[in-house]
Image (spheres, rainbow, N blue to C red):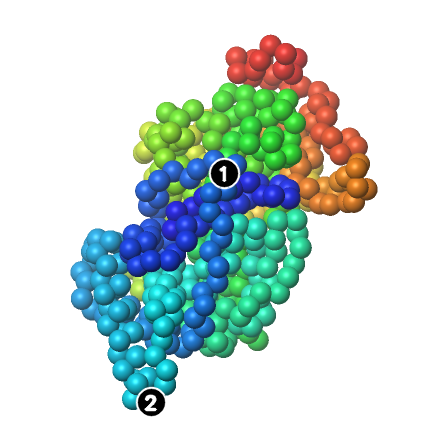
Amino acid sequence: MTPQNPQPQDLPDFDSLALADFDDSAAMAATPNPLTRHKADAAAVPSPTSLDHPAPPPSRFTDWKVVQRIRNEVANAIAAENQPGTDEQDRRAQAMSLIGNYISDEENHRLDRGEVQWTNAERRAITQAVMESLFGFGRLQPLLDDPTIENIEIYGYDDVLIQRTGNAFEQAEPVAESDEDLLSTLAFYARENGQSFDPNHPRLHMSLGPTARLYATGWVVDQPIATIRVHRLVDIDLAGLVDLGLMPPDLASFLRAAVRAKKSIMVGGAQGAGKTTLLRGLVNEIDPWEKLATLESTAELHLHQLGKERHRRLIALEAVPGNDEKDANGRPIGEITMDDWAHDSFRMNLDRLVVGEVLGSEIIAMFEAMQTGAGSLSTIHAKSSATIPERIVTLARKDGRVTEDFARRQVAENIDLAVYVDMVKTRNPWTGESSLTRRITDVTTYQPGEDGRVAFTRLWGLEEDQIIHQMSPEWIDDLRPFLDEDQVA
């Protein structure tokens, strides 16, 4: 399936995606595998303002036990016949052939039982469902394909909530036949992604294709729980975020200049506020010829999809959990940590290192990236820009490898800007209706303060639903080569 990025019709979640219709077998065989890690899509993601294809309708075939049975048989047959490194298109073509054979076998059993034969449309639907289960995400796929859905929450196989653009929740159809079926399906996708999801590994973090991130847990809770965040906008820059109402043009110019002047920027906000989308917009202002690496515990930025026009020298790095076997030092075989990648990055001749989302151990990699002075970019969960320093200190203390004073000094000396994005209640002057809109609410700079504390100065702040420039940073002269003459003085 080829990711698209149409503009949302209501507002502004910055996110929108339509997938090509999955109607014929040729299209199915040619569809890129979203489970393949660290591979760029064949085509660059198009502009978020185009809506060329509607989301495909749900499959008309609903006998998912048949789909799962055929999927398992085809997967086992492919695994038994293919050698490591088998070409993806060959695997797909082989799967299409096997599916046809297994459908014929199923129909023979139906004849023996005196049941009605499937129609051609039903056969196509079965083939689609099996291919999506093998190379996509099965019954989750229609939800991932829907351009209006931002979040999917699963509380057991038959309690599925979806959150659309505009923050409305609604019930969706079940995504499995039972909780056991849901666990089995998630375990299948985990194995395809080189991970384990079973009673000994009851937590799962993984990407679902090029735009979604999944967290799931099972066995240690009453019923399987999963949360899927769908990032609809990947190819977005600051001008695009201005169009979507996240910030005014003058703030976009200021942030663009800060990125190009290699200032280190931390994007803060609550869950779902748009931090990752804003981070993508900032990263996409970097000169395409800078050598750039992204370092993430679970891939979310997906900048490698955008083609060489955006980032000609890009390395996308993701932590690898390793397997149950241990080496002589007691470390999981195959494991690559954030620290490992951060250490290796100093041998990559990088111009800039972006450390994605900082949730825990990433904090040390972020410190190392900021210390280079090359303009690191990261995101963090926080209540406000004023609380970001203490949030960083808390994460550093939990990690245990640096002192509290060291962490505060890193913030004060190395974070040039903190940009906070939030959900703001706005009122339509024409209708009087209120709605939640994503906005940058303040931009802050940090400096060393008294007694080792972090002092901060607000440069932009929210006033009556508008973010207003309040003062310029001490290092404004560093930005002047990148600013228009009529910009911040």
Check the image and name the residue furthest to the top: 485
Q: Position of residue 446 (x, y in %)?
A: 64, 29
Q: Say what secondary structure mark 2 lies in.
A: loop
Nearer-N-terminus badge (1/2): 1
Q: Position of residue 194 (x, y in %)?
A: 34, 59
Q: Is residue 410 above or below residue 459?
A: below
For residue 456, what is the image quadrant? top right
Q: Nearer the viewer, residue 37 or 243?
A: 243
Q: Position of residue 166 (x, y in %)?
A: 66, 49
For residue 107, what is the image quadrant? bottom left
Residue positioned 53% across, 50% down in the render:
147
- What amino acid type is highlighted by mark number 2? Arg
Left-right relation of 52 to 484: left
Disc 1 to disc 2, C-alpha distance: 50 Å
Residue 414 showing in the rendered view: no
Left-right relation of 13 to 351: right
For residue 438, what is the image quadrant? top right
Left-right relation of 5 to 445: left
Q: Say what secondary structure mark 1 lies in.
A: loop
Q: Which residue is mark 2?
A: 113
Q: What mark, if any, has residue 50 been given in the picture? A: 1
Q: Which quadrant, please, contains the C terminus?
A: top right
Disc 1: CA contacts within 10 A as few (<14), some (14-19) or many (>=20): some
Residue positioned 46% across, 56% down in the render:
56
Q: Nearer the viewer, residue 79 or 363?
A: 79
Residue positioned 79% across, 32% down in the render:
464
- What amino acid type is highlighted by mark number 1? Ser
Q: Is residue 180 above or below residue 215?
A: below
